[in-house]
Structures are given as C-alpha cells and as structure tokens.
Amino acid sequence: MAADLALTKEELRRLILDAGAVAVGFAQAAPVSAEFDNAFSRWLAEGNAATMHWLGNHRQLRSDPRLLLEGARTIISIAFPYFQPQRRRASLPQISMYAYGRDYHKVIPKLLRPVCRQIAALTGGSTRICVDSAPVAERYWAMRAGIGRRGQNGSVIIDGYGSFVFLAEILTSLEIEPDAPSTRHCSGCGRCRAACPGHAIGDYSLIRPQRCLSYLTIEHDAAIPLEQESMDALASPAGRNTLYGCDICQSVCPHNAHLFSRETAPDIPPDLLPRQPLMLTLGRDKAAGLSDEEWTAFTAGSAMRRAPAAMLHASALRLSKKDNTSYK
C-alpha cells in the first residue's frame, strides 16, 4: 500500500479481523492461471456441475475478477467462522451448521461494509464486497492470498481454525502488497473420502455432486430424475438422516478436531448463531408435518431459503418414512 495512504496493510487486516474474520490475505487482482481456468473448463465439460448450470455463466468475469470492479488492483480474501457451539443431536435429521443462523449472504456484507467505508474515508479507494454474489473463484483466491490450504474434500482449511468458514472477498482499487500464496494441501489422510456417504470425493479435490448429500438436499433440480448413484447416496444411513446439507467430510477432518474437542467453540458473529430454538430441535415428525407455508416461515432469513419449501417438505416426508429407500 502506498506510503501516503492513511491506512496501512496491517491496519486494514486488523479492521477485518476485528469485524469477526479468522483469516485475511491479500492477492494482486489479475486473471486466474491458465491451469486453473482449463481445469475448471474440463470440470464443467465432464458434467460435474450437474444441475448447477449457473456455474458455467459469466466465464469471462470468473476468469478475470478485475472486470467486477473498475480499477481493481487487489483482492482481499477473508474467512469468517461458522462452527456452532450448540449443534443438533445426531439422532435428529441433520441440517448443515452453515444454515443455523441468518443468511451469510446478508450477514457478512453487513460486517464488511464498515471496513469499506473506512477504506473510502481514509484512502479514497473504491471497493466491492463479494460473498457468493459474483462469479469469483473464491477458493482459488483464498489460496493465492495465502489464508489456507486445499482439503481433499475441496474445502479451504484455515491453519489454526479449520474449514468451517465462509469465504468472502473485497475487491479494491488500492494497490496492496500481496501476501505469499499458499501451495500447501492437506495431509491427505483420506478420512473425508472414507466417511463420505455417497463416495462423492475423488482425486485432486474433485467432487461428484450427483453423489454428494449437500448437493442432493440443497441444489438438485427436483424436476430432473435422480440417477442411481444419487438414490444410493440418499439411501445410505447418513442419507436417511439428512434434511439439508451435510457436514460429515468436515467433521472427520483432523484439522477440525480441536473444534469438537473444545468445551466452548471459538466465537462466531452473533447473527450466525441459531435464529430460533427449533433450528436445534426440529425432529422427523414435526418436520414432516410442516406445510410449505410453514417451511417458508421456518427458513425466513436463513440460507435454507436456497432450497424451495416444497423440496424441504419432500425431504422431511422422505425421512419420516420407516422404509425410505425410494427417491423417484
């Protein structure tokens, strides 16, 4: 950062950490590497986006984030924690921890806007906040900014914290000295691959969505019939206990073990804590009895809104069946 600016790089990093982040890194705004861009193209061509067709949109923007903010010179990669100090009992239908609180798409920009106002006031620099709200290759930029390593399950692992994080970016016109990129990967113990109910985790962090419980209970277009491998994943013991999302591959990761062993989890932004008691106690019978309108009310303000109420209702009915092995 230029010497005449009234905000140093470390002061800016501290502002973001004080907003609730657990890691902050800086990378030069530039096109993604040809290696990454080509690998992503192959991944799409092989059908790995499944019904998530939007992943193939705006390829030029995804390849060059400078197009998202005029004059962008720096990408600030940020990780916010969401590991929950109170969690649903294992006997209850599982809901991914990321959805317990208010929708992170709204919570994290709210936390970062005061930082951006400070940047504007002290330096005159322009900014843009991205939290799954623009076609940014967030895991790529997290590695380029040096905030974590890539796990076999595709998650970014933050050293000293783990992988239960939301990734966000601030694009800025400020020219800030980049941090050293991370070239490390996880230890490769294979626990996530072994524990995955649908055997969705392949080599080189390649995830096959059609076998992933998170994809199947959040993203899959219900109008498209399930393939056999998808039905097999849902028929697994974990699948028969999954309502929305899946945390299994992260829960068995050694990098997250300290989170489960601590008496109290590290602080997370208050708005990411459970919005209502029912988020921790909703059982099969109660879930199956909710109407679409009641599902809409239950998920109000939550990231669970990503799944239509009818889809959540259908999932709850599936879990309530004694013999829930048919998913057509």
Image: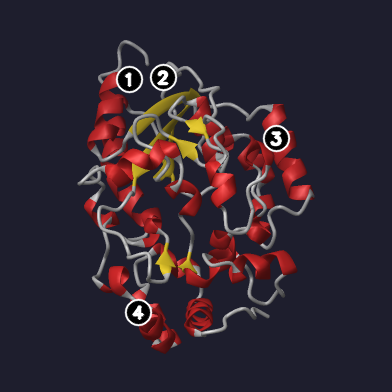
Label 4 is placed on what type of residue? Ala
Mark number displayed over residue 37:
3
Q: Is residue 52 visible from the viewing direction of this image?
A: no
Q: Secondary structure at mark 4?
A: helix
Q: Residue at x 58, y 67 (%)?
A: 236
Q: Nearer the viewer, residue 288 or 30?
A: 288
Label 3 is placed on what type of residue? Asp
The quadrant in which residue 158 appears is top left
Label 2 is placed on what type of residue? Ile
Q: Give percent across and percent down for residue 74.
A: 47, 26
* Residue where numbered disc 1 is placed: 9
Q: Give percent across and percent down for residue 322.
A: 51, 85
Label 1 is placed on what type of residue? Lys
**Mark 2 to mark 4 CA distance (whole Å):** 44 Å
Q: Quick one: quadrant of the N terminus? A: top left
* Residue where numbered disc 2 is placed: 176
Q: Compare marks 1 and 3 and give the one earlier in the sequence.
A: 1
Q: Taking 274 as reference, is 77 left or right?
A: right
Q: Secondary structure at mark 3?
A: helix
Numbered-mark total: 4
Q: Is residue 181 visible from the viewing direction of this image?
A: yes
Nearer the observer: mark 3 or 2; the answer is 3
Mark number displayed over residue 297:
4
Q: Compare marks 2 and 4 and give the one earlier in the sequence.
A: 2
Q: Neighbour class for label 4 at 10 Å: few (<14), some, many (≥20)?
A: few
Q: Give percent across and percent down for residue 67.
A: 58, 37
Decide: is 165 above or below 248: above
Farthest residue in the top direction? 3
Q: Residue at x 32, y 35 (%)?
A: 22
Disc 4 + disc 1, Cβ < 8 Å: no
